[in-house]
Amino acid sequence: MLFYLILFLGTKSFAQSPELTVKGEEAEKVRMNKLIVNVKVVGNIAYTTAEMHFFNSGTRQMEAELIFPLPENVSVSRYAIDINGKMREAVPVNKNKGKQVFEAIEHRRVDPGLLEKVDGNNFRTRIYPLMPNGERTVIIGYEEELSAFDKDNLAYQLVSRYPKKLDNFELNVSVLGTSASPTVSENSGDAIVFSKWNQSFQTSIKKENYQPSEKLLFKIPIQENAPSVIMQNVGGQHYFYGNTFIEGNKIAKKTPVSIGLIWDNSLSCKIRDVKKELSLLNAYFQKIKNTKVTLYFLNYTFEKQKEYTITNGNWSELKAVLEHTNYDGGTRFSQLNFVNNDEYLFFSDGLSSLSENVLPKTKKPIYTITSSVSADFSFLNYWAMQTGGNFINLNQVNQDNALDKLTNSNLKFLGIKENYTVTDLFPVEGTSVSGSFSFSGISLNQKNQITLLFGYNNEAVLERKITLDAVLQNTNDVNVEKLWAQKKIANLDFQYDKNADEIELLGKKYGIITKNTSLIVLEDIRDYISYDIIPPAELRAEFDRIKKQENDRSLAQQKNNWESIESYFQGLNDWWKKDVKYTAPKPLPKPKVQKNRRSDNEENRSSGRSASAVSTRSTNVAAGRIEGTVLDQQGLALPGVTVTIRGEREGVYTDFDGKFVIRAAENSTLNFSYIGFDSYQLNVGTNNQIRVQLRENTQSLQEVVVTSYAAPVRKRDMTSSVQSITSETISQNADIAQRLEEKVSGIAASSSGSIDKVVFDEKVSMPISKKPLIIVDGKPFEGELSDLDQDDIASVDVLKNTMVTALYGSRASNGVVNVVTKKGESNMINNEPKTWNPDRLYLKALTAVPKEKQYDLYFELRNGQERNPSFYFDVAHFFYNQGDIKKALQVISNIADLGLENHQLYKTLTYTLRQWKDFDDALFTARQIAKWRAHEPQSLRDYALALEDAGKYQEAFDQLIKALEVNYYGEMSGQYQGVEDIILMDVNRLTMEHKGLKTGKLDKKYLEKMPVDIRIIMNWNLMDVDLDLHIIEPNGEECYYAHKGTQAGARFSKDFTQGYGPEQYLIRNAIKGKYQIKTNYFGERELTESGPATVMVEIYTTRAGKTTKTLKTIQLGKIKENEILAEIVW
């Protein structure tokens, strides 16, 4: 089960809350038992530290994942966890390296810690391990610039909500640098009073057995027209940070005649504070009175809804629509289209889960508006600024201020008057200004003066002079250099892709979490040395001492797939050159056997006995061989009995007289199985001649008869006894039966178009009391061949070997005519959808209602399934199988909005989109995974295959080579090593299918053509699950991790038990018949919630040099064995 912990620390909004997700049967045993929040306000900067204690009262070791959103202008710069009872501070690390190191160490079952920034302004950390009856402590610290509550006050808002009582709760607030006492605007608890102490005001709250539920808003007095500036000297450079209140003359903008209202109704926006947004719209329409509004819904699609005429502020019809909007699907900003409106109001969280965060160009102003805490504030701010609109964060401004931003022209920061001794000043020019305005830069002189410029349309209308004095304004209470770095990062983040390298350097230098910089905690000093990560201050001396002694000898070695590519390629190439062509074991010559007649009484007694055996040892039998006869209980020979050795897949069939010879060691156990009879096992000991009687099982016979006609015809098994004609041989006007008589020896046809006789060999003709069994596309056909449409026939095979009775039962005693139609040939891969949920009651409900009501019912059913990835997977496939591709894509796209940077969910989505041939969206999701998991060869391979699907063949090839070159730490060999086998075959196939690719410096030997008839690859989306691929070949032999080579010449890749796979099956010369693709799924060890395991099977079949690719995606969920994923008929 899942347990969601709700808590919100020191932020400015209460629309959404963080979640602590604990997975496992005892998830409810994990709770926060203690919370201490310390807040220090200096000027307009608030420093918040949250110390959280988590207690596991259960009996199992647990892991939890905490994701929490923080508001605009917040930077996380502290993270610490307890190691052996002491708090260990985190240090900055490249985000991708942090993931690699964390996962490598975690697989040693020790306790590293990692805090990273994910989409928007959201942060994620894992808490591991939570020991039984144990407690873990996590500290997170962050800084934020306080915005103006009104003209006279800054605002600091603290919201904490928690569904269960805390043993201890403590809040401490200290406000420095103000002459007047802060006040509490609103609270639902006891009265809070600040007391003065030295140059600060302080307050404290301590509670026991307490459930925080109130919102606290502190108003901090500011002095208008008295800029607050602080400075610090760092290496001769004087960093400064200032804050002032700016309010220019309000200039009303022109009332828009037409407004484009873009309403993001994707799933992630379902938790927006819609009441706040509607309240702002109401105020706006009351202000402008008359206009036209065109409503657009944006989620997976972008669709115009309706045009509304607002008269005298009446917008009730439009309001009703927005109040009853359904929120569904992922988000694609790529679908946006700005048509001809005077302005656009864009209500969104700024998170585009299925396309790049880029808006199309427009010359009209866009007002980006959000009420969501979990939002991409940089994106929303940047695009408003680029178009001359305004960004309105309803969590930070009240309605009056928000309305001002909508109705008045924007006052902009236009930079400073020329001053060459001031550099790196932020914010950037063009930033909107309203009320409190902060700035930061570097002065090359100890004393200086700057003039801030503000105006409209690039014309300055307001100046504000700021005096800088490094002596008078020096402070030790605040790290001014770090404030400057935070402000620079926030401004560079507007164009992250362009500034990524500089952002990473700043993040590492100042210990600030960014999109590409994380904070990591390691347990052992040796880990910092091995992974070359500078440790926190308390470990630095020991770190330097050991490094000096050992130089680089202690560095963790990163593995490169090229290190083993030669051996993997050589193995593949040697296997391929063997060119195995399988022939079935030949039956022994017919011995002369005297059959004794029995009395009726003897037969009756015999029929009641169980299976039995008699074995002896003979010196006439060669060593290592066992000869035998298999009979029924009446003493009649059983032809076609399967005889195998336990633990092995190799075996033989009994001949017409029930005789067999098999190679087996002493003390081997033989398995005997036959249609309609109980299976039997016999340990031969030292004997080499045996006689076995099998007991008939009518129940088993009935079950087999139902399905046995679909058993595959194995042409290569019976090379001497199969003769064929193709569609080219069957002329349009010729009779099929007559053509068979002409082309196939042993066929006797009548003038009526039926086959009267099949001769099994030149000497013996089977008694013809029945016609041969006719099978069409795997199913028995009761009519005559002349009943079939000859234009639809792809091929006809005639099987005359006596062993066909082992495949098709007694009805095949007169031979088998196997017909494959052109339609059947195209459907030789069974793609019937499966899902992990065997009950799927919601699908039964959807099936029961008319099609026009199914989508509405889906929303009703979703109420109890909103966070369940399997629900969307199942329902999407339901619509897809009905032919409603649009709804299927809409529903499946919800998976992208279920988690922030959740690569496992995105893999599920990528697999499905590729199967459904939505190549553009699959390319985006695969690219995102490759960006998040740049150290994983499997993820890079997935991206390469998505590039190939999209027709980008050269890029696909380059990406495959990158997958071979990627480095990973040795601890992760179980997850990644072995994928070379699969990638080499990808490279080989790609270069064969797409000529003219630039292969660069790749050794030409790796491009040697190695075509195969069948190639099957099984991938899965969850790390650390136990999944096994099994292929049942037409002759019954099973190929899997413990039996990697078969008599038919198949080859199986490495067994992956810890990673995502993939596992691969290859056969150069496929034998005719049915190949079953199965998996054994033994459950997941993955502790975070990404839904059940999703499997994607890639099937490549090559006929006459042409390769066909089929993809199939299945969700497994529960522990399953021998789950059939797909079938191939060759």
Image: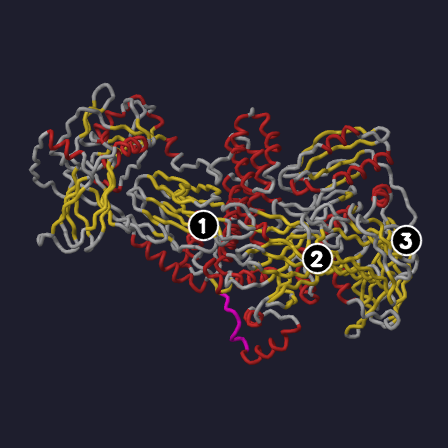
In the shown orientation, is residue 659 left or right of residue 977? left
- Residue 6 showing in the rendered view: yes
Q: Residues within 10 Å of mark 3 (few under 14, many from 20)?
A: few
In magenta, the rendered stretch is: 551-558
Name the one closer to the observer, 788 or 1111: 1111
Residue 480, horizontal then vertical, whole percent: 79, 66
Residue position marked by numbered label 3 in the rendering:
152
Residue position marked by numbered label 2 in the rendering:
168
Q: Determine the secondary structure under disc 2.
A: strand
Residue 1050, horizontal then vertical, whole percent: 33, 50
Name the one closer to the observer, 587 or 723: 587
Is residue 557 on the magenta stretch? yes
Residue position marked by numbered label 1 in the rendering:
990
Q: Main secondary structure of the magenta part?
A: loop
Q: In the rendered image, which quarter is residue 283 located in?
A: top right
Please report the residue visible at 57 percent of the width from the left and 37 percent of the height from the top. 889
Which of discs 3 and 2 lies nearer the camera? The answer is 2
Please report the residue visible at 26 percent of the width from the left and 42 percent of the height from the top. 716
Residue 948, horizontal then vertical, whole percent: 50, 47
Going by the picture, which residue comes out furthest to the front?
Answer: 209
Question: Disc 2 marks which amino acid?
Answer: Asn
Label 1, label 3: how many angstroms apart (C-alpha)?
Answer: 68 Å
In the shown orientation, is residue 1075 left or right of residue 612? right
Q: How many numbered callouts?
A: 3
Rendered position, 1039 above or below 676: below
Label 3, label 2: how many angstroms apart (C-alpha)?
Answer: 35 Å
